[in-house]
Image: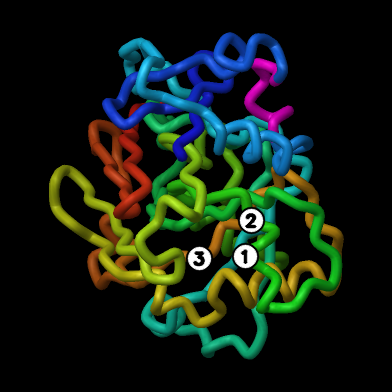
Amino acid sequence: MRLANLAGRLTLVLDDGRGADVEALSAGAFDADPQAVFGRWGEFLRWASGLDLTDVAGEAFDPAALGPPVPRPRQVFAIGLNYRGHARETGAPIPDRPVVFTKFASCLTGPVTDVVVAGPSIDWEAELVVVIGREARSVSEAEAWDHVAGVTVGNDVSDRDRQTSDPARQWSLGKSLPGYGPTGPWLVTTDALADRDDLALGCSVNGVTVQESRTSDLIFPVSRLVAELSASVTLLPGDLVWTGTPSGVALGRPDKPFLRPGDTLRTWVDGVGELQQRFVAR
């Protein structure tokens, strides 16, 4: 199942790519607010499993009208250095436990956007983003996926100068400028994935592939991340977990080819979808 935020309304994306408004389809049983569904996730899944979509007449839509699938998460967790190649290219040691920071929710956008180049060191980071569907507190790795509603695509756009400025590094601020958290194009439930632990992902700049990997290469897979996070905090329905980026970022390249106005960034996760960002001057 694919769920989108279409112009601020919860929308079921049908197999033919058209969208069906959930509030209308459910005769008002579920709210149009895309965020509200996570508070009733189990009930929503039971309702959706009984749908006969053969006679549902969806409507075509412009991907530019899509907003973030999870527009107002209460908590956003992000994981650093979670692929060995990325840790090596940044000169960091391989972590023994997940490196956790946040992207502030105000940076979240939909899948097709213009992004302001706010400085000389703006970088790309393709990521799989996990959406929590059930409250999780001290869950085991074996139970972790049961608390996940689905996944989406993200790019952890980063201002490296702000992120690494001394004396105090500001990871969260450097990764949370307006528009620096594109997500989408929709949430895909885990039952629709061929292998939830082995998804190809990557991104390209101006048509040239710069990152390419698989989530099976994560140092700490999704199940470990959910278990580790829930051991310290309570994960809430609708929370986001950005799982980390593979090697190939601009910071790790000898020529440091940071993003410039006019560049186009495409990010994908196979079986989920893709993002398209155009970078513009202030």
Amino acid under label 1? Trp
The percent position of residue 61, horizontal first and vertical second, equals: 34, 14
Are discs 2 and 3 less than 8 Å apart at CB? no
Badge 2 local density, few (<14 within 10 Å), some, or many (20+)? Answer: many
Residue at mark 1 to residue at mark 3: CA–CA distance? 17 Å
Check the image and report above or below for 3 versus 257: above
The residue that appears at 58% across and 9% down in the rendered structure is: 24
Kindly indicate the quadrant of the structure image that contains residue 52.
top left
Q: Is the magenta stretch mostly helix, strand or loop?
A: loop
Check the image and report above or below for 200 versus 103: below
Left or right: 102, with 153 as reference point: right
Are discs 1 and 2 less than 8 Å apart at CB? yes
Query: In the rendered structure, which segment of residues is drawn in magenta?
Result: 30-37
Residue 157 in view (yes/no): no
The residue that appears at 41% across and 24% down in the rendered structure is: 53
Residue at mark 1 to residue at mark 2: CA–CA distance? 5 Å
The residue that mark 3 highlights is 244
Under tag 2, what secondary structure?
A: strand
Left or right: 277, with 45 as reference point: left
Left or right: 3, with 277 as reference point: right
Q: Foreground residue, 271 or 56?
A: 56
Amino acid under label 2? Val
The residue that mark 2 highlights is 148
The residue that mark 1 highlights is 145
Q: Is residue 34 magenta?
A: yes
Q: Between tags 2 and 3, which lies in front?
A: 2
Q: Earlier in the sequence, mark 1 or mark 3?
A: 1
The residue that appears at 56% across and 33% down in the rendered structure is: 50
